[in-house]
Amino acid sequence: MSALVFVTTGAGGREQEFWWDELEQVFLQPDELAQQLVIGIAGSRRSWDLSADRVYTAEQQERHRGWHLLDEHFPTVRHAVFRKVYELVQPLAIDARTRTLDELLALAGRDGGAVRASRRAMEPGQVARMVEEGVMDVGAHTVNHPVLPVQHPDVQRTELSRSKRDLEWWVGRAVAGFAYPYGLHDDVAVAAVRQAGFEFACTSSYRPADPSTEPFRMPRIEAPAVDGDALGRILRWQLQ
């Protein structure tokens, strides 16, 4: 079975991590932060008291390595603030999102240009080679990975058309598929997908596809970190 990977083209080859990885740098890497964290988000100042966990050790980082953003529990105050800031930053316009992350990185004393090898996005040539070697096929996933429904329609159309154009330039052939960032979409985004020339688009609706499924609102079933036998059981259960 071949793999189809959806690519965010704005990250290719840049000396900057994805915004959620920058956020993880601020809160979940061993260091010491100010007792009171105050930042500007969407035109207002937000503050959090980090005194209980202003110092975060390497031992704590290792202990909580299995924590996930969507977990219902928060091992430390830092994890709770990470989740809240993520929720506030995610829907921002691209420029506002960048300003907020730059301010956070500065407050944490971290260099936004320091890209960790484990967080580096693939470069265009690497994507092209993987496609040429038959390892995977690719679809588009916008340029900057915004929440499309809260963006201006012109921004949505630009994100879609440019990501398709960029990716086709990288791999040297047509790109048929698209995936909505975070699975979020509205009628404007669906219309923009059609206008950009895609043949199908994926949401994050957790259900099987069937003959009545609309090609521009395809569902997806999550493949968790399990072995092949466990994944087979999940797929069989979904298809019952």
Image: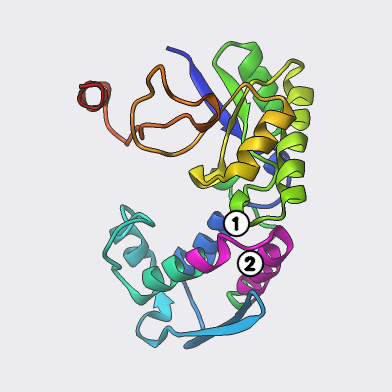
Q: Are marks 2 and 1 in contact (CB under 8 Å)?
A: yes
Q: Quadrant of residue 204?
A: top left
Q: Amino acid at mark 2?
A: Leu
Note whether 122 is above or below 89 in the view shown: above
Residue corresponding to mark 1:
19
Q: Is residue 222 above or below residue 185?
A: above
In the rendered image, residue 221, in percent from the top left (x then y), is placed at: 36, 32
Alpha carbon of mark 2 to alpha carbon of mark 1: how far? 7 Å
Region of the chain picked out in magenta, as a range? 87-106
Mark 2 sits on what residue? 101
Does the segment drawn in magenta span residue 94? yes
Horizontal and vertical percent position of residue 12? 70, 38
User: Residue 150: x, y in percent?
Assistant: 62, 57
Magenta segment main secondary structure: helix
Horizontal relation, residue 150 to residue 3: left or right: right
Nearest the viewer among 47 and 188 is 188
Q: Is residue 121 visible?
A: no
Which tag, 2 or 1, sits closer to the chain's start?
A: 1
Looking at the rendered structure, the secondary structure element under dot 1 is: helix
Relative height, residue 215 to residue 151 (above, below): above
Quarter that holds the N terminus:
top left
Quadrant of the frame with the C terminus: top left
The secondary element bearing badge 2 is classed as helix
Residue at 68% x, 68% y is: 102
> Callout 1, which amino acid?
Trp
Instruction: Work out whether residue 39 can be spotted.
Output: yes
Q: Nearer the viewer, residue 136 or 193?
A: 193
Query: Which sits in the foreground, 121 or 63?
Result: 121
